[in-house]
Image (spheres, grey):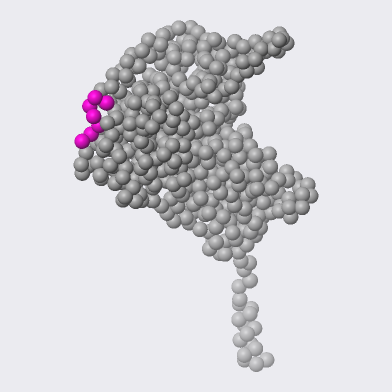
Amino acid sequence: MTVQAQNIDAITAGAMPHEEPALTDGFHLVIDALKLNGIETIYNVPGIPITDLGRLAQAEGLRVISFRHEQNAGNAAAIAGFLTKKPGICLTVSAPGFLNGLTALANATTNCFPMILISGSSEREIVDLQQGDYEEMDQLAIAKPLCKAAFRVLHAADIGIGVARAIRAAVSGRPGGVYLDLPAKLFSQVIDADLGARSLVKVIDAAPAQLPAPAAIARALDVLKSAERPLIILGKGAAYAQADEAVRALVEESGIPYVPMSMAKGLLPDTHPLSAGAARSTALKDSDVVLLVGARLNWLLSHGKGKTWGEPGSKRFIQIDIEPREMDSNVEIVAPVVGDIGSCVEALLDGIRKDWKGAPSNWLETLRGKREANIAKMAPKLMKNSSPMCFHSALGALRTVIKERPDAILVNEGANTLDLARGIIDMYQPRKRLDVGTWGVMGIGMGFAVAAAVETGKPVLAVEGDSAFGFSGMEVETICRYELPVCIVIFNNNGIYRGTDTDPTGRDPGTTVFVKNSRYDKMMEAFGGVGVNVTTPDELKRAVDEAMNSGKPTLINAEIDPAAGSESGNIGSLNPQSTLKKK
């Protein structure tokens, strides 16, 4: 044997065994992509094919909150996006689970909440040939019309870019819902770990500032300075922007009175001297120049026209919005200001600080007088300690609770329960009131309550109509399972709107009537939470205080007069009724 051969044999004999390359798979790449982009929580309902994805995410340090129904998980993700400005993540199974989550996704898009619905799906080759796969559905095609963007990932190496595109789409420009379709085969695809790591994308500047044009700011200031009865309307977009100090400075330094939309309440305290919330009708009808900050002239503002707004042609509108197509959507916007709210408000502030005379004192006095008169008129209704309670007396007790606990988060839904609470319960801090928003949907309550507690760590007071609670009520088990500091108050008047309807034939209960004297508090007790039944405002106040002090999951069944409440609440005009009588 030659020396060279001997050397080769020696090297071979001492060599280390061949090492297999490190591998990763689709499951881990999805998790790694989310973690890389600062996602900390997933809201989900486990099942095929995403059960292990939830398990592995939890093992990798993500918080995974499992719900009883996908729509509630989706609502939680949506409001998490509103509260954090990061896309809330909802994870669902395919087909029916996807469809359940789709309602929340569409609602998030309508409300401009950043959210990503991630759903497992059937295999493309079977779906495309319609061969009848397990839960077969072309989910991407269904989702596209109902959200801001929709993407499908077929290869593990594309997961990083797919997640990145979803995140950027959800939060950039006008925020909204995004659908991300992950077929079942994707999760078990295996690739080299180094290649997988290099394929991940950390999104940089996902929601870049969009500065308004100087000419637009100058135009808006000219219109505003010419006003004799100026008004600012703050929408939930202003709350989402988290430009709290700038918005407050705009109001206070301009001296212009403001009306907050419901989820913008608390940007400035509702008790602020410039708040015209309690004089809303007068403010809208008699103003001559209206500055919209993150608010849209949709049905909630009567589309900017009609008797709500006084004489036709009596208004000039200035609108701040990041979406240029929003301008002139219902009426002419004489001074459109396109850009992100923080940048636009700061630019307006710079102009106001240079040369500003303030709002005319007679306009401020008119609104102040109307506000004080309305508050005085409402006061006796709120102070009644009657049994059974009416909506006003019960809400009067809760009004005091929030006044004493301004840091608590109020979740609110229903018909009369929602409408009256908007005007009665004052808010003192931004993003503390969460409600049904633009669509006015029922069923957001428990999802919003769970996410509010998870994302903020603050105590949550969920004030629910008995009908609204029924849409998501099973999530009380979720609240108990995760031991969340949520107190639910159900205004129980035995039905939808009222509990007094009857079936003219005598065969069945009326279509809007529930089981009389239901004890929703027993549901909470069944899962280990605290259940309380109350019949007076004093009892209600004491029960809520005890719940908020303890931090224990609590449900309070508040007995409301079955005859209390009006048909469809404040939007009865939108509910057509037959005037014909059968002969």
Residue 164: where, in percent of width, then height? 52, 54
Asked if residue 410 is positioned above or below residue 115 in the image, the reply reads above
Check the picture and name the quadrant holding the N terminus. Answer: bottom right
Q: Which of 502 and 329 is in front in this view?
A: 329
Q: Residue at x 37, y 37 (%)?
A: 317
Is 358 a magenta residue? yes
Q: How many marks?
A: 0
Residue 554: where, in percent of width, then height? 51, 22
Q: In this view, does 432 lie to the left or right of 520?
A: left
Residue 170: where, in percent of width, then height? 50, 47
Asked if residue 112 is positioned above or below residue 550 in the image, the reply reads below
Check the image and name the residue furthest to the bottom.
2
Q: Nearer the viewer, residue 189 or 480?
A: 189
Q: Give the range drawn in magenta.
A: 357-363
Residue 291: where, in percent of width, then height? 35, 36
Q: Can residue 432 be seen in this view?
A: no
Q: Residue at x 65, y 10 (%)?
A: 502
Kindly indicate the quadrant of the structure image that contains residue 397. top left
Check the image and name the residue furthest to the top.
387
Asked if residue 61 is positioned above or below residue 228 in the image, the reply reads below
Is 389 a magenta residue? no
Q: Which residue is drawn at 62% across and 82% down?
A: 10
Check the picture and name the quadrant holding the C terminus. Answer: top right
Q: Which residue is drawn at 27% across and 37% down?
A: 226
Q: Is residue 132 visible?
A: yes
Kindly indicate the quadrant of the structure image that contains residue 495. top right
